[in-house]
Image (cartoon, helix red, strand yellow):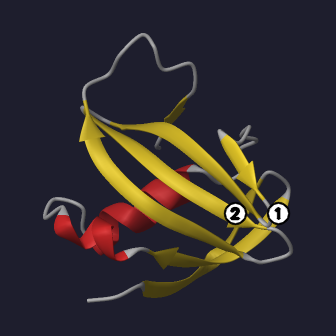
């Protein structure tokens, strides 16, 4: 299937203007993770400030738990230095745990 590319309404993440999403192929293997779910979860990151889990120049890697009503998603994503996209590496449904220090609630 390959990578998928979406143009989105501008959002701000870590002070960076983002207007594009690139979704890695492994996300497609999770049947319950539709394009609509991906777009909603990325939109939940708007106006967030997040500390990267890892940095390997030019990429910063992040892991965020996003609560969507009764469903919780673990989103692994990246930002590339000087680029205007968010890269989605993988998304999984997860059970909520107290070990998650950072939780974004989707409106």
Figure quadrant of the N terminus? bottom left
Q: Position of residue 74 (x, y in %)?
A: 39, 41
Q: Nearer the viewer, residue 63 or 44?
A: 63
Q: Residue furthest top?
A: 98
Residue bearing mark 2: 79
Q: Position of residue 25 (x, y in %)?
A: 33, 76
Instruction: Answer above or below: position of 60 versus 54.
Output: below
| Secondary-structure class at tag 2 | strand
Q: Nearer the viewer, residue 51 or 48?
A: 51
Residue found at x 48% / y 20% = 100
Decide which of tag 2 and tag 1 comes sooner along the chain: 1
Q: Position of residue 106 (x, y in %)?
A: 46, 43
Residue bearing mark 1: 16
Residue found at x 55% / y 76% = 21
Q: Residue furthest left?
A: 31
Instruction: Answer above or below: position of 45 versus 19.
Output: above
The alpha-carbon separation of the residues under discs 2 and 1 comes to 9 Å
Q: Is residue 6 left or right of residue 59?
A: left
Say which of marks 2 and 1 sits in front.
Answer: 2
Q: Position of residue 61 (x, y in %)?
A: 63, 51
Q: Is residue 59 left or right of residue 101?
A: right
Q: Dot 1, crowdedness within 10 Å: few (<14), some or many (≥20)?
A: some
Q: Is residue 52 left or right of residue 90?
A: right
Residue found at x 57% / y 26% = 102
Do labels 2 and 1 touch, CB within 8 Å? yes
């Amino acid at each position: 299937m390959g990578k998928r590319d979406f143009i989105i309404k501008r959002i701000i993440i870590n002070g960076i203007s983002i207007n594009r999403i690139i979704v890695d192929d492994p996300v497609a293997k999770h049947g319950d993770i539709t394009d609509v779910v991906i777009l909603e979860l990325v939109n939940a990151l708007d106006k967030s400030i997040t500390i990267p889990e890892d940095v390997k120049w030019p990429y910063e890697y992040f892991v965020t738990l996003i609560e969507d009503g009764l469903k919780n998603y673990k989103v692994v994503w990246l930002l590339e230095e000087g680029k205007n996209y968010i890269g989605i590496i993988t998304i999984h449904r997860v059970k909520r745990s107290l070990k998650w220090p950072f939780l974004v609630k989707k409106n």
